[in-house]
Amino acid sequence: MHGYFMDLKAYQKLLSAVNPFAFEKFKKDQIKNRLAQTARINLKKVTPKANIDYMKELENREQDKTKKKDRALAKDVLADDRFKQMF
């Protein structure tokens, strides 16, 4: 071997003196990784038991880019609490 052996505690102390913010960077990376893992949860969309065809028609109208008025009305109907019983 070349060089010389150094005590691990002394090496870690020197390393922390050279890069004092390494631990904070490590913590941020760990938090980012955990958030990325938990963000993979897929929420299932609730499908209606009745009026399925009407619901699909409203969703198609909502995604239609040519008619702004129909899109706004469909969005209002889907978001309105009074119509939740229909779906």
Image (cartoon, helix red, strand yellow):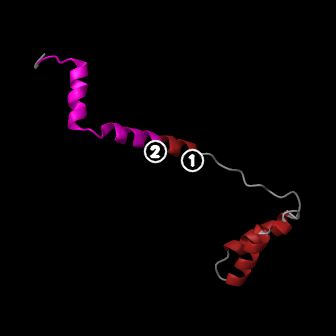
Residue 18, picture quadrant: top left
Query: Residue lying furthest left in this view?
Result: 3
Where is residue 48 shown, x and y percent of the image? 83, 58
Above or below, 71 relative to 41: below
Residue 8, picture quadrant: top left
Secondary structure under tag 1 reads loop
Is residue 25 found inside the magenta-colored segment of the image? yes
Where is residue 66 shown, x and y percent of the image? 65, 82
Is the Cβ of the residue at disc 2 closer than 8 Å to that at disc 1? no
Q: CA distance from mark 2 to mark 1?
A: 11 Å
**Numbered tag placed on residue 32 in the rendering:** 2
Residue 9, picture quadrant: top left
User: As drawn, is 24 to the left or to the right of 49?
Assistant: left
Seen from the viewer's position, the closer of residues 16 and 53 is: 16
Q: Main structural element of the magenta stretch: helix, strand or loop?
A: helix
Residue lying at 87% horizontally and 57% vertically, measured from the top left: 49
The residue under label 1 is which amino acid type? Ala
The residue under label 2 is which amino acid type? Lys
Is residue 46 found inside the magenta-colored segment of the image? no
- The magenta region covers 4-31
User: As drawn, is 43 to the left or to the right of 56?
Assistant: left
Above or below, 25 relative to 44: above
User: As drawn, is 54 to the left or to the right of 72?
Assistant: right
Residue under label 1: 39
